[in-house]
Image (spheres, rainbow, N blue to C red):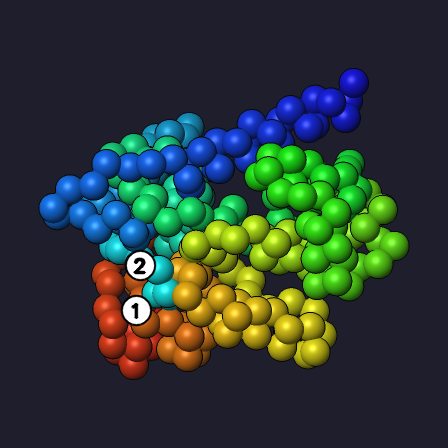
Amino acid sequence: MGRLKMFEAVLKRLLLTKRLATEPRETTIEREARCVDVVNVTMDFHTEQGTKRALQGISFQVRAGERLGVLGPNGAGKSTLIKVLSGMLEPTYGEVHRGLSLSWPLALGGGFEGQLTGYDNIRFLSRVYGLPFQATLDYVDHFSELGRNLFKPLRYYSDGMRMRLAFALSLSINFECYLIDEVILVGDRRFQQKCHDELFSARKSCGMIMAVHDAGVVRDYCQKALLLKGGRGRVTSDMQLASRIYSGL
């Protein structure tokens, strides 16, 4: 019974993210359909100390093949923005138009249920997304290199093992835009190169929105940057300028 409840809780989160990422949207003359279009997004949290504004008036577009780096100090609103984009949080004001199918957020620690095994999570997600289970299992097994660890509960996984599973599962689904929160490359140098090749070479036609602390990553791999401070944002395609501004935040 406990496992059933865990499946139901994860299912609700994934179905919401999947629906928001893939549902058709109306197109207008002003809005390009094949992009992620963020329009004046504001996010408020109500706390015992009053209302805290985490994001204020954020707007940008990401088309297929474009990579946007989100830079900002701790508490700037990076992770909140990624959660709003994925559908995990509903913005207080503004809209997110998802003209590209979005992955769930890739973040250190992932979003998987710790009581379930890696195998269980693969089987579950393949059913949610309508993927052939054996082919998905083979891909995840090969890419993650977790071997027999796939049959252990995730609560016994290290952060690196969870990220290997999260990367492999996300890449087993043909998303059109990937959401990455803080972590891009994990594991030893060889596995990092494997992740790099898959994300930036094999899937160069996909969009990507990366919330990171490293301005060098944004400069090397992104076409534009969103600089966040105190929930406010500025978008620039000048990567050198973005690096200079970020170093002063």
Image: 125 above or below 135 = above
Where in the figure is residue 239, as x and y percent of width and height? Answer: 30, 77
Image: 193 above or below 150 = below
Secondary structure under badge 2?
strand
- Tell me, yes or no, if residue 118 can be seen here: yes
The residue nearer to you, when weighing 86 against 42, is 86
Instruction: Using the image, tell me which numbered label, if any, was put on residue 63.
Output: 2
The residue nearer to you, when weighing 44 against 237, is 237
Residue drawn at x 42%, y 75% is 221
Residue furthest out toward the top:
1
Where in the figure is residue 49, as x and y percent of width and height? Answer: 38, 32
Quarter-of-image position of residue 97: top left
Q: Amino acid at mark 1?
A: Lys
Q: Amino acid at mark 2?
A: Arg
Disc 1 crowd, CA 10 A, few/some/many (<14, 14-19, 20+): many
Residue furthest out toward the right:
148
Image: 233 above or below 190 = above
The residue nearer to you, when weighing 80 against 5, is 5
Q: Quadrant where the C terminus lies?
A: bottom left
Would you name the residue on which mark 1 appears? 224
Point out the frontmost of discs 1 and 2: 2
Residue drawn at x 12%, y 48% is 30
Q: Quadrant where the N terminus lies?
A: top right
Q: Are marks 1 and 2 in contact (CB under 8 Å)?
A: no
Query: Could you tell whether 231 is left or right of 142 in the image?
Result: left
Secondary structure under badge 1?
strand
Residue furthest out toward the left:
29
Image: 65 above or below 179 = below
